Amino acid sequence: MEQYPHQPPDPPRRDGPEQDDTHGHDTGTGGHHGHTHRHGTGGGGHHGHAHGHGPAAPVSQHLRKVIAAVLIPFTVAVVVGLVVLWPGGAPSHTRTGVGFDRQTQQATVTRVTEVGCASVNASGGAPTGAPSATGGAPVKQEAGRPCKKATVRVDTGEDTGRTFTEIVQPDQTRRLHQGEKVVVAYEPSAPRNLQYSVTDVNRTFPMALLAGIFAVAVVVVGRLRGVMALVALAVSFLVLTLFILPAILQGSDPLVVAVVGASAIMLIALYMCHGLSARTSVAVLGTLISLSLIGLLGSLFIGWSALTGNTDDNTGLIHGLYPSIDMSGLLLAGVIIGSLGVLDDVTVTQTSAVWELHEANPAMGWRALYRAAIRIGRDHIASVVNTLVLAYAGAALPLLLLFSIAQSSVGTVANSELVAEEIVRTLVGSIGLVASVPVTTALAALVVSADRPGPAAPAPAGGRSAPARGGRGRRRKR
């Protein structure tokens, strides 16, 4: 036990049924924690511990009512929005046979042989210039380089057991192997020998295995919290697939749908993972304020930058199939939903930091709590913003390579709608994340410091309780 020169040494231990010893530890944050340990050494073998620093006192009933007065109407509004906007399923349409809008079946490559490209074209196996879905250009005759002729068996659908041939050119990036599972597209209006074509590889098993490893890792490390996190993830996915996507396809305003859906995901995920408490409620409030800021800034700058949201083949196909969908609104909806996951992380972390600081030193006022927690938040801001920028840059790396090959200037690249869309998405989301740190920290500091600790409990009989003090650090030796 640490001794200070200005303090008298502890008296020698007394023989008897009970011995007391008191340790005073300075936290370095302006508070002093007193630890009182009682050790029973009598014949009964009793061993008791009484700690002068326990968990922080729960939030008062008055503050709970204030938080409930804000969150209950918000939750009711989210539930009403879900009921009013619930789509009941995505609308049907006639398949165009373009891109992802094709009928597909599962198939297996049963045989692969080498053939001359010229002989394949001459025999009519695949006409010169015919497109191939395995990733290359139309079949061309290349002297000295053999083509691959794959026999593919359809495993699902009405044509189960039917076989067809697929020609793989020497310059194609995807190669077919015997026994490989593939995905084939089916076009019933095409000639019989051209109705099926390989479009992709079946990746179900490796992806399912990776998902299983992820789930096991989360449960092993997170235990019950990990299980609840996985359940919340599944619920979020259900909200996305059963509500957000079909509601947008039904013609509802994408921004309204995204706000309602993201709010539902936020409430379910946060309360399910972190429990129904004032701490979680403060994180919800911080997330809600930050999402509102992201929606406001996103709406302003997407309109000001004249971003249409229709920048590639997929968005063009969506607009062609459902012309009533507001594509710029869809872009804004994506910004809100994409920012939600990182926002949850930031707000929960900041709220927990404030609560733990208060538990370590209940005497700290809200300003001291804010200053201490905001230092943690600054480190979080730096890492999160860098993560977002690198994530978007990594996703757009092929596009950036194209601009680099074309030797385009930075201004030209940034001004193109495809890149400007990502820049606006990144900056708007980052501004919301940065704002969430001081907002959530201030809310948490105000809530957790609103209650003053009650009168100190009397010290145990025969014990010596060290009084708490509001010093500025460890007492210096004299």
Image (cartoon, rainbow, N blue to C red):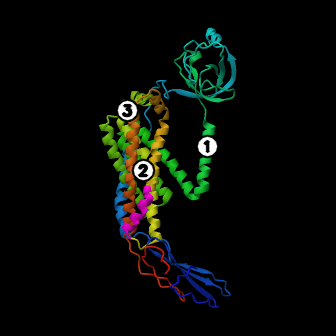
Dot 2 alpha-carbon crowd within 10 angstroms: few under 14, some 14 to 19, many 20 or more = some
Q: Which residue is mark 1?
A: 210
Residue 475 in the image, given as x and y percentages of width and height: 48, 77
Q: Is residue 230 left or right of residue 318?
A: right
376 is within the stretch colored magenta: yes
Q: Amino acid at mark 3?
A: Glu
Q: Residue at x 39, y 41 (%)?
A: 425
Residue 284 in the image, given as x and y percentages of width and height: 41, 56
Give 473 or 388, whichever is nearer the viewer.
473
Q: CA distance from mark 3 to mark 2?
A: 31 Å
Q: Label 1's element? A: helix
Q: Which residue is mark 2?
A: 264
Q: Amino acid at mark 2?
A: Ala
Give the magenta range. 365-378
Name the mark nearer the viewer: 3 or 2.
3
Residue 257 in the image, given as x and y percentages of width and height: 38, 43
Q: Which mark is residue 417?
A: 3
Q: Earlier in the sequence, mark 3 or mark 1?
A: 1
Q: Do the CB atoms of the residues marked 3 and 2 lie less than 8 Å apart?
A: no
Q: Earlier in the sequence, mark 1 or mark 2?
A: 1
Q: Amino acid at mark 1?
A: Leu
Q: Do the CB atoms of the residues marked 1 and 2 lie less than 8 Å apart?
A: no
Q: Is residue 459 left or right of residue 420?
A: right
Q: Label 2's element? A: helix
Name the mark nearer the viewer: 3 or 1.
3
